[in-house]
Image (cartoon, rainbow, N blue to C red):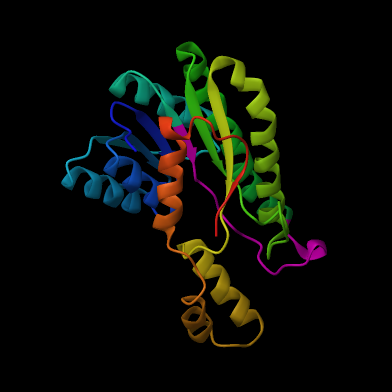
């Protein structure tokens, strides 16, 4: 598998699955355009790619802000001439273990702004470039939560179910332009967000967060495993794949 001469925009690249996807795409020879709101982690990912001889750029971006997302895609074209793929990993989990009748509307809106609106905006501005090229791949990070099962957070599960629906709609809308669209639904992966969620679950039940995290090591997957799948999906080798991909 090779991503030579391909430009891949990756949001959420500061940590977790987004960082893993960025490192895997760079290892496969891709030019990576890294984006995240967390500047320190973003610079670390950029530094690791650069130190390994990879070609990359990075930009601090709030994916819920249309102007920032538009500037991200314009910058990718300015730096590398095109956008071959978008991997949208930016996402947050808030409101865990809060009953729906107690969930603050501001928390709900914040999760929707990042997870769902951010997914829409990155697709909107990446698709505009890809339609001109008549080729591209868009990969949206959904989740098993909201698609196959529930979630500890009403807002998170709902947002991820909606992201999955967005990918299903966009697949038929963009395929005439040579743009392939996938939703990827990871299962239990040892990301900072997932580990924080496990600790919260233990604490809410009066149990030891440290012990819960220790037990989780036995069943959680490595983010790199999903990162390799994402890098494969945006390669030409995945050209015959369609629709939703579920991981462990």
* Residue 26 pos. (x, y %): 29, 41
Vertical relation: 222 (above or below) 162: below
| Magenta part of the chain | 86-104
* Nearer to us in this view, 248 or 23: 248
Q: Residue at x 65, y 45 (%)?
A: 112
Q: Quadrant of residue 104?
A: bottom right
Quadrant containing the N terminus is top left
In this rendering, the count of numbered labels is 0
* Residue 73 pos. (x, y %): 43, 26
Is residue 69 in view? yes
Q: Main secondary structure of the magenta part?
A: loop
* Residue 175 pos. (x, y %): 60, 21
* Residue 71 pos. (x, y %): 42, 26
Q: Is residue 48 magenta?
A: no
* Image-based side of 100 in relation to 219, left or right: right
Q: Residue at x 35, y 28 (%)?
A: 7
* Image-based side of 69 in relation to 187, left or right: left
Q: Quadrant of residue 93?
A: bottom right
Is residue 109 in view? no
Quadrant containing the C terminus is bottom right
Q: Residue at x 48, y 77 (%)?
A: 218
Which residue of the protein is positioned furthest toward the top in this rendering?
A: 132
Q: Is residue 96 magenta?
A: yes
């Amino acid at each position: 598998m090779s991503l030579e001469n391909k430009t891949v925009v990756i949001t959420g690249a500061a940590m977790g699955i987004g960082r893993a996807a960025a490192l895997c795409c760079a290892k496969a020879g891709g030019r990576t355009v890294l984006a995240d709101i967390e500047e320190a982690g973003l610079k670390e990912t950029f530094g690791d790619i650069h130190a390994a001889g990879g070609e990359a750029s990075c930009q601090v971006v709030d994916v819920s802000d249309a102007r920032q997302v538009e500037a991200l895609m314009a910058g990718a074209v300015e730096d590398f001439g095109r956008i071959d793929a978008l991997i949208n990993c930016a996402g947050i989990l808030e409101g865990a273990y809060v009953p729906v009748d107690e969930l603050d509307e501001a928390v709900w809106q914040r999760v929707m702004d990042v997870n769902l609106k951010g997914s829409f905006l990155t697709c909107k501005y990446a698709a505009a470039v890809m339609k001109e090229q008549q080729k591209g791949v868009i990969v949206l990070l959904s989740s098993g939560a909201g698609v196959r099962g529930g979630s500890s957070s009403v807002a998170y599960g709902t947002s991820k179910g909606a992201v999955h629906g967005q990918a299903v709609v966009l697949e038929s809308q963009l395929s005439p332009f040579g743009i392939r669209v996938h939703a990827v639904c990871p299962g239990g992966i040892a990301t900072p967000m997932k580990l924080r969620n496990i600790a919260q679950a233990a604490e809410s039940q009066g149990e030891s967060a440290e012990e819960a995290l220790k037990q989780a090591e036995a069943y959680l997957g490595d983010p790199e495993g999903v990162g390799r799948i994402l890098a494969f999906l945006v390669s030409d080798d995945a050209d015959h794949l369609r629709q939703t991909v579920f991981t462990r």
